[in-house]
Amino acid sequence: DFTYQNNTLAFSNMRGRLHGGSFSGEGALRLDEKTYRLNTAFEELKLRRVIHHVTPRIQSDGRLSGNLRLLGVTEDTATLQGEGWLQIDQGNLFQIPILGKLTPVLRPIIATFYPELNETIAFREATAQIFIREGRIGTENLILRGDRAALYGQGSVGFDQSVDFHLWVRFTD
């Protein structure tokens, strides 16, 4: 459903298929102020297809579900604000861009303390509540789970590619 009133284009009851999964949403675009708001939910999107739009060379797999609420000005990413949650199942998550940057740090630590696990840890599930503000995307409760370890974290990644993250690993027996 679309409506246009007082320089605002609004949509609601949007539903469809996207990247092998489904989405729903509603939002509005204020044409005179160039501001927008978007509320969306998505289920079972193919992670590889989603990431390909951001970084085509990354080869990650999995199913992405979650929701996002976003506000901002159309031509200024610094104004973007939002929150939501994300969940990835059936994943191969060591190659997600933020995790890819951490791989050179994590692998030597794993090799030192658990040499039998080196190169064999793959995270299959992930969950996080996320926030977007001040040019950064962050979380206070990242959890990645694999067969041999779980990775917990909090921090943020800037739109400028800067990373400020605190991580800890718990190995399973």
Image (cartoon, rainbow, N blue to C red):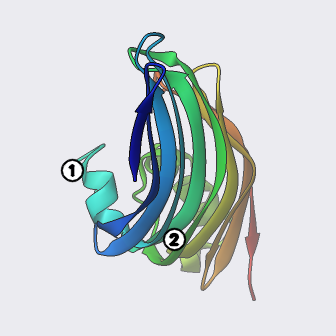
Q: In which quarter of the image is residue 70?
A: top right
Mark 2: amino acid: Asn
For the C terminus, give its image quadrant. Answer: bottom right
For marks 2 and 1 on the same chain, the one whose residue lies earlier in the sequence: 1
- Secondary element at tag 2: loop
- In the displayed structure, would residue 111 be above or below residue 78? below
Mark 1: amino acid: Arg
What percent of the width, then of the height, locates residue 141?
A: 77, 55
Residue 24 visible in rendering: yes
- In the displayed structure, would residue 90 be above or below residue 60? below
- Secondary element at tag 1: loop
- In the displayed structure, would residue 157 be above or below residue 90? above
Q: Residue under circle 1?
A: 57
Q: Residue under circle 2?
A: 118
Asked whether, in this view, residue 5 is left or right of residue 37, the answer is: left
Q: Residue at x 49, y 35 (%)?
A: 28
C-alpha distance separating marks 2 and 1: 23 Å
Q: Which of 129 and 146 is in front in this view?
A: 129
Q: Which residue is drawn at 26% across and 62% down?
A: 49
For the N terminus, give its image quadrant. Answer: bottom left
The label on residue 22 is none
What percent of the width, then of the height, locates residue 107?
A: 53, 58
Q: Which residue lies furthest to the front in this view?
A: 5
- In the displayed structure, would residue 111 be above or below residue 55? below
What percent of the width, then of the height, locates residue 161?
A: 46, 27
Q: Residue at x 56, y 77 (%)?
A: 117
Q: Residue at x 65, y 35 (%)?
A: 156
